[in-house]
Amino acid sequence: MTPPEPLRRESGRVYAVPSFRILLHVEKPLGDPAMKAVSDALIDLFWEGRSHENMIFGRAGGRFKKLGAEYVTPKVIAKAKKWAAEAAWEWPSTLRFARWFDDLECSGPPHLRLEQRAELSTIQLELPPEWQGIPAFTERVTALISDLPVLWGVMGFGMFQPVALDSLIWMLPRVTPRYRCAIEVQPDRAESSLRRSARLEELRLKITPVFTLPDIGWRTFIGDEFLPRLPDLPALASQPGITLSRGDSFTVVQAGAAPIWGDVNMAEDITPYRAVAHALKPCKPEWIRVRNGLFGGYENDNGLERIEQWYHRFED
């Protein structure tokens, strides 16, 4: 299994790197005691057996107060855990750890991001794609979040773009033609697909809210509010290679025994992913919203073609 190369701009500077990705949007504020307990456990799990070498840290509390990145030491980790436990987590608040790659002039996995968004909280983890501990790590993360109201999430191989380079999201998706199962959506844009009724009520808009699932992965987490629109979901349990399990308020669909890139050149079998995509089609984002927003729009026809390839990648 050969992962993609880091993605580079014309200047040669990297803007996205291959990773094993975990993205979760949760309908509970990070300031909630249950979320604080999970955040504390995730920080411990993230650092378990991990070197501090070349790691950086950053956090922001409140709209204007921001602290720059600094090299990570045990003291920095202890301070981060204390801040996470005591912070009000008012929007926008974030805590991030990442590795800095001097040769790429870019941050990348291992990466952890805990962030309070306007309406949802975000849990984001990226791991080195070659790391042998991924299966056990995913099991432990899934167990930690089992009682949380996860609205949507994915786990699987994909391309991580640092938050600082979000302005380049229009250059994604990029690896779809060869790596059909790569997760290229980024959490900030994915959140726009999960439109919340509370926000619409606040704006007093007389329209029916439409909620869509931004993407699927090796594991896809589906909040219970989507289930009435997914009549074919239970039948997936009888299909080869697919398993369904439950959290407190969400369903987890796993496509295959282990994650894959869906490498066309290696003829990797993406049949389970296609079956999941078909079952979740009633909640697939509308093409116009994907075209105009999920990847920040496009500059030319080549960009539009990339988005179209991504949008249709699991169709027969």
Image (cartoon, rainbow, N blue to C red):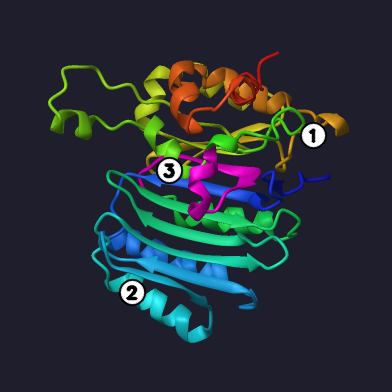
Q: Quadrant of the C terminus?
A: top right
Image coords of residue 295 (percent x, y): 51, 33
User: Could you tell me which residue is drawn at 54 percent across and 27 percent down?
Assistant: 299
Residue 219 position (above or below residue 230): below
How many other residues sit within 10 Å of disc 2, few (<14), some (14-19) or many (≥20)?
some
Task: Identify the residue position indicated by label 3 in the image.
Answer: 188
Residue at label 1?
Answer: 263
Q: Amino acid at mark 3?
A: Asp
Asked whether 163 falls inside the magenta stretch, the response is yes
Q: Amino acid at mark 1?
A: Asp
Label 3: state its secondary structure.
helix
User: Which residue is at a point 45% across and 24% down the rendered structure image?
Assistant: 292
In space, the residues marked 1 and 2 are separated at their CA atoms by: 42 Å
Tag 2 residue: 83
Q: Residue furthest front?
A: 11
Judged from the image, the secondary structure of the residue bearing numbered disc 2 is helix
